[in-house]
Amino acid sequence: MSGTRRGRVSRRVVLTSGVAVGAAAAVGVPLGIAASHRDQMPAAALPNGLDELVRTRMAELKVPGAAVGILADGIEHVAGFGVTNVKHPLPVDGDTLFQTGSIGKTYTGTAIARLVEDGRLDLGAPVRTYLPGFRVADDRVSREVTVRHLVTHTAGWFGDSEIETGDGDDALARYVEMMATLPQIAPLGEHFSYNNAALCVAGRIVEVVTGQTYEAAIGALVLAPLGLGRTSFFAKDIMTEAFAAGHELPPGDPGGEPEPVTPWALPRSGNPAGGMTSSARDMVRYGRFHLGDGSVDGTRVLGAAALRGMQEPFGPGGSEGPFMLDGIGLTWHVTTIGGRRAVMHAGSTNGQQSNLVLVPERGFAVVVLTNAGAGLRLAVDVVDQVLDRFLGLRFPRMAGGPPLGPENGEYVGDYEFGPGTVLSVGASPDRMTLSVVQNGQEVMGGPLTQAGPDRAVVPLLGVEGITEFVRDRSGSVAWVRFSGRLAPRRR
C-alpha cells in the first residue's frame, strides 16, 4: 500500500528499550487545566535535596527539560526543571506535557483489565475470537495466539515494524491488517521479546469489543474515570499547551548542544503501544490508582483483585536495557528491588525518555519525564536516588565482570535484529564485542563483560545494557536478547 513502510527498524529501537509510537487521535477527554491556571502552580522543590540532584545531572547530560513526580506516604511531590524547547523555551512545571512513550502500554492493559472484569474479554481466548481475519506470516501462530500472548510480549513475531496508515479512525485496523507478512522470530509463548506490534493488536481488540476508536475507548475506560484531564492523544489540543519537544545531540558531535528533533507527532496506528502525552502530575495520579484498591474518589473503577492481578507475573521475564525482569504482568514489567516487588514501565519517543516505577507494598510511585535522548540516563539516576532516599532501596545492577573470552566462542556470529540491522558478536584473543550494524554501518557497540551464565553487559547510552544469549530446546544459542528484543542467529 502506498505510503507505508514495512520492516524498518528505527534508531529508537536500537538505542533504547521501550519504543513508542503514536499521535493525533480523539479521546473525548479535553485537557483540563488552562495555561493561565497552570501558571499559578509553581514547581515545589523536591524533598531531601533531590531538586539539586536533578539540576546537576541535567546539566551534565545536557537534558533541556524534565519533570519529576513522587507519591510517598500519601503525599504528592511534583516539580519541573529546565525548558520545553531550547529554540522556543518555556519553563517546565508539573503540568507540562511530555510524550510518555511505552508507559502508555499500561493504559492499554488497564482498559483490557476492565473489559476482562466486565466479562467482555478473555485473556485466554485466541485473537481470532475478536479479529477473525487476523494473520501474521506463520499460519499456526495466526490461529493459536491469544490475548495473553499479546500483553506479555510472548507472541514471538517481529514487533518493531513501523507501518504508517494515516491519521484516520481506521489507522489501527489497517495496521493490523498489514501485519500479515511479519515473520516469526521465536516460538509462540516461550520467550519474552518486547513487541510493539502485539500491543497494537491488543488495542485493535479494544476497538472491536467496545465499538469505539482505541483513543475514545481509553478515554472512557481509563482517562475519564481516573480524572486524567491532562493526558491525551489529541495533537491539536496538545499544541495549544506547554509541551516538551524532543532533543538529541547533533549527529557525530557528542560534545555539541542538544537540538530539537522532528517529527514530533508519530503514527496514530501505534497509539496502543505508547502514543500518549501526559504530565508528571497526571502520571502521579495514575500511579496512585494502581497502588490503591481500584476506586477513585469512592467510585469503583476496577476490582482490587483485578488491579493486583495486573501486577502478577504471568509471562516470562528477561533483560530489558539495564534491568532484569522477573516476568511480565498485564503489560506491567515486574521486578524485585531489595526483596520487594516493583512494577514499572519505561518509554521512548523521538528525543523523549520516561520512566514510571511503583512499589505497591510501600504505596510508592516515582515518574521521570524528560525531553532528550540522554534522559534515559537521567531517569535511571533519579529513580535510583528517589528509591534510596525514600525507601532505602536501589535497583540491582548487572555489573560486568571480566571480559568475555575465547571460551565463549559459541556466542560469536551475526543475529538479525530486523531488516537492515544486525547484532554482530565478534571475538579477538582477549575479548568479545557486540556491534550494532545498520545498513552496513556500525552505529554503536562495545566490549562484552561477563554478568552470569549466558549474560553479559555492554555500554548502552551511558547505562549498563544487559545482553542475554538465549538457547533453544536443544541447548544451542539461538538468539541474543538486546534492548528487550530477541534477535535470531543467522543460519
Image (cartoon, helix red, strand yellow):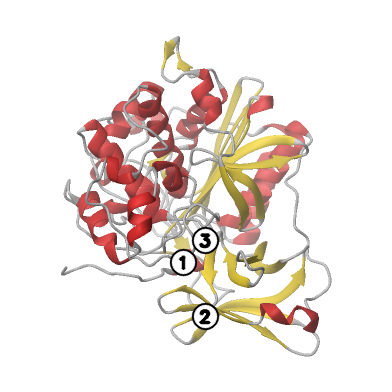
Mark 3 is surrounded, within 10 Å at the Cα level, by few (under 14), some (14 to 19) or many (20 or more) other residues, namely: many
- Tell us which disc is closer to us: 1 or 3: 1
Label 3 sits on a secondary structure element that is: loop
Distance between mark 2 and mark 1 Cα atoms: 11 Å
* Residue 430 position (above or below residue 453): below
Q: Secondary structure at mark 1?
A: loop
Apparent side of residue 173 relative to residue 8 in the rendered image (left or right):
left
Q: Amino acid at mark 2?
A: Arg
The kind of residue on which mark 1 rests is Ile
User: Vertically, is 353 above or below 281?
Assistant: below
Question: Do we see residue 275 in this rendering?
Answer: no
Q: Which mark is residue 152?
A: none
Q: Earlier in the sequence, mark 1 or mark 3?
A: 1
Q: Earlier in the sequence, mark 2 or mark 3?
A: 3
Residue occupying image coordinates x 46% and y 64%? 12
274 or 407: nearer the viewer:
407
* Pointer 3 residue: 373
Residue assigned mark 1: 185
Tell me the residue that label 2 is attached to: 490
Quadrant of res 364: top right
Q: Residue at x 33, y 45 (%)?
A: 127
Q: Position of residue 6 (x, y in %)?
A: 30, 69
